[in-house]
Image (tube, helix red, strand yellow):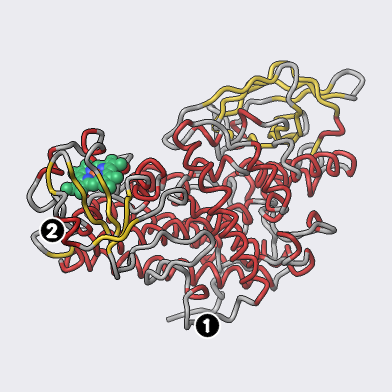
Amino acid sequence: MASKTLKEFTRDEVAQHNKPNDLWIIVDSKVYDVTRFKDLHPGGASIFLEEDILGKDVTETFYGLHRHEVLVKPQYARLQIGTIKGETSQILAREPGSLSKVPYAEPTWLSEGYYSPYFNESHKRLQQAVRKFVDEVIYPDAQAREEDGKRPSQAVFDKLAEVELIAMRMGPGAHLKGRTLMGGIVKPEEFDYFHEMIVHQEFARIHARGYIDGIGGGSCIGLPPVLNFGNPELRDRITSEVLSGKKFICLGISEAFAGSDVQGLRTTATKTADGKHWIINGTKKWITNGTFSDYFTIGCKTEKGFTVILVERGEGVETKIIKTAYSTTAGTSYITFDNVKVPVENTLGKEGQGVYVMLSNFNHERWGMACSGAITQRLIVEECLKWTAQRKAFGKALNSQAVIRSKLAEMIAKVEAAQSWLENITFQMNNMSYKQQSDNLAGYVFPLNVFEDCMNSDETSYRSIGLLKMYITSSAQDTARDAVQIFGGRGITKTGMGRFIEHYHRTVPYDSILGGAEDVLGDLGVRQAIRNMPKNARL
Ligand code: HEM
């Protein structure tokens, strides 16, 4: 609207423009000339010709049918010709980087007037900067890519790399050393799991589940084995390429033949006669980011057992897209390896000990998913609180119905519980060594039947990350179902008012399957508790 001078009108003046060939309306103290637009209106022309619309204030009707973003789009914003004298707009689009004032739309630590024992000034600085970055850089690309299904734009990866967000998404550690994080607002040595939680939670605010995986789902799980088990040359080269956003890596374990059952995997790696190379044959399925990855951290069967090997894209490697319920922007792929020759130096960890390599990042991955799962659920609470306040049915706001309030109560309680539990676990992680985290928060889950013998004999784990993730993903599915009921037909429609609800409901099962299926994780948590029952405990 910057180029157009807006005039001021009285409500009486607007009311004069009440004919089909001269039609103005008022929305939130702004005056729109919709004379020509009415014939292009996606909701039809006839609705503008009603007595209560022609020349009238239609704010309430408008917000019962449209998201505010409609008026912000340039093609519709230009319909505004003026404002009402002496009035100011009440409804404002959220400023990039700002916090929501809707109750429960933000976790307690970001809500005005509340306190938290966990977060300090550097956490707050990071949260503000990442939220602005997400609003300005990631959200627009995420929404466009969800539409066209293409991979996230390289320009976004370049910007992510510039502020070291790709590195921060890997969590605290040596890979952050010497890097300038978000323009220097957090020092690498002070970066802890709460900082990482902030990054995951802010990223998850884009209402685009496939895109979240598209901008780094593969590297978050494919790079750690290289970081922790690759030889120094390999580790440094690949880490630098991936963290600079120039190259991409993914983790390939599951196959059409087997997922959790590693013994059932069929991809083989056989050594050449001179012992210098592996020859890899086999397939992988459901590999996030596979279609655009340059590197593949894959599980193979070798003479000595399960082994993890890094494969570079080249002769014999083919990737093709798998269409899943979420967007192809995640690059979910089917991969074939036909006689792929790989130097033995690309072996990650020891031959036959791939299970340790694979398990080493499992807890971290699950916890990361719990971070984003807790926040996407919260976004749905915000959508529902807004919708039930602005939508009228039987002459009253939806939230005046007890049955609606009861659903909202359930949703709010779940999301608050999820975040509190997550923050507690994150605090434990910050204060524990890696071994203590494995012993006390995780235990091995994948696949229990085969690798029971891998478990630490001194394991004391019973505050389980697995149970936390199970709770978040199962309550998320309840919330998705309730939200669809609240939004009705709009909750199953890909455009308009309920589009984020439709998206959430369609993609919410991802978190309950990826990184450990919900039931398996729940069972693991209870088994750990049972194993840790004191021998002398009696009623
Ligand atoms: C400046 C004024 C308006 C603009 C720019 C506008 C724009 C739009 C757009 C873009 C849509 C497509 C759905 C969406 O993306 O949300 C739509 C749908 C619709 N609009 Fe409007 N509109 C305006 C005013 C109105 C008014 C005053 C009414 C009510 C009398 C109305 C009734 C509808 C209806 C019934 C639909 C279909 C909604 C659905 O499918 O659920 N519009 N409008």
Q: Amino acid at mark 2?
A: Ala
Q: Which residue is mark 2?
A: 393
Pick the front one: 453 or 176 = 176
Which residue is depicted at the point 59% across and 47% down? Answer: 446
Pick the front one: 140 or 210 = 140
Q: Are marks 1 and 2 in contact (CB under 8 Å)?
A: no
Mark 1 against mark 2, which lies toward the viewer? 2
**Does the image show residue 491?**
no
Which residue is depicted at the point 30% across and 64% down? Answer: 385
Q: Quadrant of residue 288?
A: top right
Q: Is mark 2 within 8 Å of ligand 1?
A: no
CA gap, disc 1 to disc 2? 38 Å
**Does the image show residue 74?**
yes
> Residue 276 vs residue 182: left or right?
right
Q: Amino acid at mark 1?
A: Tyr
For mark 2, give the secondary structure.
strand
> x and y percent of residue 509 in the render?
41, 45
For mark 1, give the secondary structure.
loop
> x and y percent of residue 92 in the render?
38, 62
> x and y percent of residue 283 in the render?
62, 24
Which of the marked residues, 1 or 2, is nearer the chain's N terminus? 1
Q: Give the quarter of the figure containing the C terminus.
A: bottom left
Find ligand 1 in the image and state its quadrant. Answer: top left
Pick the front one: 510 or 490 = 490
Q: Which mark, residue 353?
A: none
Label 1 crowding class (10 Å Cα cut-off): few <14, some 14-19, many 20+? Answer: few
> Residue 194 vs residue 435: left or right?
left
Q: Which residue is mark 1?
A: 115
